[in-house]
Amino acid sequence: MQGDPHVRRTAALGAAGTLVTGTLIAGAIAATPASAGQQHHRGTAEDRGVRIAAARAAETGIDWQTCPADWGLKAPIQCGYVTVPVDYAKPDGRTIKIAVDRIGNTGGKKERQGSLVYNPGGPGGSGMKFPTRVTGKNAVWAKTAKAYDFVGFDPRGVGHSAPISCADPQEFVKAPKADPVPDSEADKRAQRKLAKEYALGCKERSGALLPHMTTPNTARDLDVIRAALGEKKLNYLGVSYGTYLGAVYATLFPDHVRRMLVDSVTNPSRDKVWYENNLDQDLAFERRWSDWKKWVAQHDAAYHLGTTEAEVEAEWEQLRATAKKNPIGGVVGPAELTNFFQKAPYYDSAWASTAQVWSAYVQGDAKPLIQNAGPDLNDTAGNIASENSNAVYTAVECNDAKWPTSWRKWDRDNTRIHQKAPFMTWANAWMNLPCATWPAKQHTPVEVRTGKGLPNVLIVQSTRDAATPYEGAVELHKRFKGSRLITERDAGSHGVTSLVNPCINDRVDTYFLTGRTDSKDVTCAPHATPQPSKA
């Protein structure tokens, strides 16, 4: 439910109503290399399996090579693979290869503190662009880059790591889709049919890997990656859903964590994962959507979309009605509009560009809106990536937890939330509805909590985040004793640590470089408010 893949939510409307061997005898585990890390004893077959896989990975390491040309990762970034079991209860069974990449620390051997492994969210997001923060000379991360190799990876099922699929990519992106807001019971029945078909498509197209697409298994993969990197303990940066992955990892492997920073936090409570989290998200999106409309109204001189929030909302409703009656350019209907405009509640870096596209349309130029909101059927690679991301999102969230199977409950809850939060509620519901008829086993979520040996975790969160409401950070803070919470007040951009805000940036650097946190939680003023784009 989190991260950049979420920006493609309503692209799923056409398909879902809308984020693949070796041996080591068990007796050898006691003598595993130091880089396999502290043993974590919990007694299940999966626990034994991850210890075996990590020991193998520690011994094998990673064969770093120049990245394949079509991966878009240029030297000095290097790429490789880490082998993991499909099923950790059967470590000698089928395996898949997890794609990883890295760039070395910039400060030399004396400053190096190991690898910093990154996950951007999703589920379904690729972390493989993380090393480009160094090659792109990202000033916010320059100090941390002196001490750490920046390591990214494609989680299981994503990108170059045995990718799964639930629908034909070209069909998946076709537009226009049905309006996510239903007008009748017939509309709801049509969306329910699409959701069920999508769930079956996941089973048919993803095969034997589908049941093993879970957050705990991805966390186990992360521990194998740690071992393959030769690290005794993990340094980790997780954003959005990546915070939940980190929280599950820290629960399963508390004594394998060295430094962990989680940014824009998914509520880890069992009764929130994942159905309730998505309902909470709908309300948070509405709040941030309101923030953006107020900002647009404040800059009416630039955009001419209304001088009050109410006027901007009326303009939005007019745009939706126009697109519903006659899709703009033949491809941009209400679903595509929701998909495009949700970028503004997600990231205030998109406030100005989104408003500019809308303003151009109102002033008679529809081309920017069609280009930005409509599908590009010629972008084969991009469409495959988009469909894959949505497939992984669906598989992980549906597998992770037991979802309601009663349509009456879905209908009642989303009808109620829609009255308060009409911007995203039904689009979100249709995207997640495949979980109501999911063809694989649904599990009980991990009880996230502090374990023996877990060091201080640093939590960073803005108060008006749309994708991951602030309450999630508070909940994780309660569950991880000794953690510190940095709050960015009166801000709502999703993913805080890459924005320029010295109050946050300096503390992030201090944490990764020294392990130190403030003695108390900290509240920071917001980062700079966006300004209208200059023509």
Image: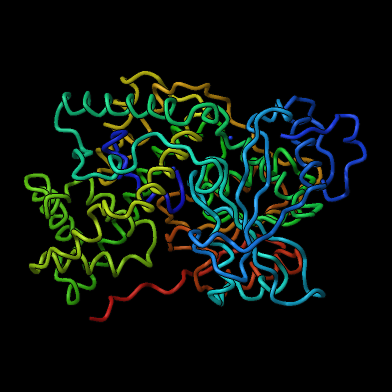
Q: Using the rendered image of the protein, determine whether residue 484 is visible from the camera's viewpoint.
A: no
Q: Quadrant of residue 504?
A: bottom right
Left or right: residue 370 compared with residue 485: left
- Image height check: is 332 above or below 406? below
At x 62% / y 46%, what residue is drawn? 98
333 and 241: which one is in front? 333
Left or right: residue 429 compared with residue 53: left
At x 32% / y 33%, what residue is drawn? 16
Left or right: residue 459 compared with residue 316: right
Q: Quadrant of residue 364?
A: bottom left
Q: How many marks?
A: 0
At x 23% / y 81%, what residue is drawn? 535
Residue 130 locus on image (x, y percent): 56, 62
- Image height check: is 276 above or below 338? above
At x 62% / y 75%, what residue is drawn? 142
Q: Quadrant of residue 517?
A: bottom right
Residue 438 locus on image (x, y percent): 43, 23
Q: Using the rendered image of the protein, determine whether residue 26 is visible from the camera's viewpoint.
A: yes
Q: Quadrant of the N terminus?
A: top left
- Image height check: is 271 above or below 68? above
